[in-house]
Amino acid sequence: MASRRLRAFKRWMKSKGLEWSDALEFVDTPEEGVEVRALCQLKEGDVVAKMPKEACLTTKTSGARKIIEEAGLDGHLGLAFAIMYERSLDGDSPFAGYLQLLPHQECVPIVWTLDEVNELLCGTELHQTVQEDKALIYDDWKENILPLLDLAPLKLNPKFFGVEQYFAAKSLISSRSFEIDDYHGFGMVPLADLFNHKTGAEDVHFTAMSSNDESDTDVDGCNDDEGIVKEETLAQNSSIDMTVLNNGNCNVSDSDSSSVSDGDTSMLEMIMIKDVSSGTEVFNTYGLLGNAALLHRYGFTEQDNSYDIVNIDMELVLQWCTSVFSDRHSRARVSLWRKLGYSACGSQNSEYFEISFDGEPQIELLVLLHIMLLPDNAYHKLDLSVAGNCDESSGTTFLNGNIFPSKAFNMSKKSLLPKKVCDVLSSLADMRESLYGLKSIEDDIEALGRCSLVRERKLYHSLMLRINERKILQRLRNYASQPFKNKITNHSSPRKKLKRTTKKTS
């Protein structure tokens, strides 16, 4: 039997013109919230839900539109204000039936306390990013929202527009917003945000008709303003028949499917991209994301996530180098590496190298380590040859049988993995792992086994993130210790990473 809040939400959806298939069942669970299941078999191409854009909570549909536009609150800042404003209206908001279904906030790290962030995320790919995000979000509130509370004509209730309420609204946007179109921008899309995520297992796809032309436009259910890469979705569905709403005895709830014609730019749709059996949960996919990105944006992790990565900071590489060589040596070798056209991820203010799920380092890191370890005479010859003896047709520089390719040219990894380089990789793995603190990975695994996902959600997912990252470092050590012939020799696996937030400079 549906919960009271689900029944209220369904009544609200009907009043706003949302349509959904009778084949969908909405289940209210204490552990995971609302999930969507199939009551009968769903077929690829079925349109199982339609949502009018006017029923979505955006800066254009909110009663706060005039305030938002006059204050110049763009993008997610404006959407956060719209959510706070509609919440301040309580039952008088036209979105009340939708808002009552949402949690006050999602359990994403930006709403954790600083003590929790420092304790639970220490050493992980999220630690610095979340610290910086919290500071930036607070600054946004202080500079843009707080001044509005002092404007008498607006009569905004501070109870609903405080910094905690702003962080709560930002957490909902992070985990639930969709890009609707150029006019609405990002918004909260009722019903579409009920479908849970499962990496690499998309069943249903969120699709919008473009307001600029007559072609379908796929849009992602997530945002990328918090230092996260906007990920590509798994499938494109521009040619699906949009009139298909029924499958066997499964009907659209209380709506005539013919009332929405092909090419209607006022509607958003959820379209099945593969068959789903009766009784199975129907998943959306927010992108091919590693656990750092999943926890950062959505507040959960997945076990053995093949899109996980670990970053080795350039700063850590230089720290190793200066412990063995001089500062001058380190700077000169990095300079030569850059002359060859190589670069790390991020920017020169925050550079890092990715270690993939299988423990394989970026070739850019291997090239840098190789150059760091060159004898002085070989280094000087290579430095001179960059300008004088470069084979421009192949983009390579030759020196004593070694090949140093310029950026974007392939290179044999075998030539970059002598024992000295492998030893450095092991040292870097140890240095990176030391950032997690004194507890071992075995301690973390034991703690995860004792942890309750329901009662200790933050601890559970932070442990999952840390354990998976440390397993990658173990694989990096194995990579460095095994004969090259047993190594993976290509980077065909996709790299889906968390962007490093660049620090502000004065």
Image (tube, rainbow, N blue to C red):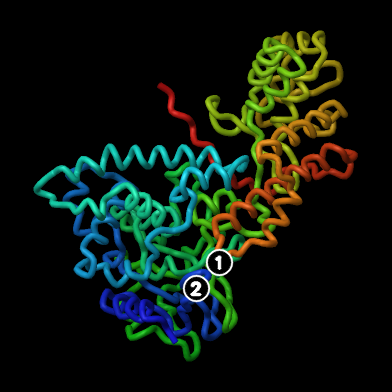
Q: Quadrant of the N terminus?
A: bottom left
Q: Name which residue lies at 70% across and 61% down.
A: 449
On the picture, is 215 further left or further right than 81? right
Q: Position of residue 165 (x, y in %)?
A: 32, 53
* Figure check: 258 above or below 370: below
Amino acid type, callout 1: Val
The quarter of the rendered structure image containing the C terminus is top left
User: Judging from the image, what secondary structure is the residue with disc 2 in?
Assistant: loop
Separation of disc 2 and disc 1 at Cα? 8 Å
Corner quadrant of residue 277: bottom right
Q: Secondary structure at mark 1?
A: loop
Q: Nearer the viewer, residue 301 or 188?
A: 301
Residue behind mark 2: 30
Q: Which residue is mark 1?
A: 454
CB-based contact (under 8 Å), mark 2 and mark 1: yes
Q: Is residue 155 visible?
A: yes
What is the three-letter code of the residue carrying label 2? Pro
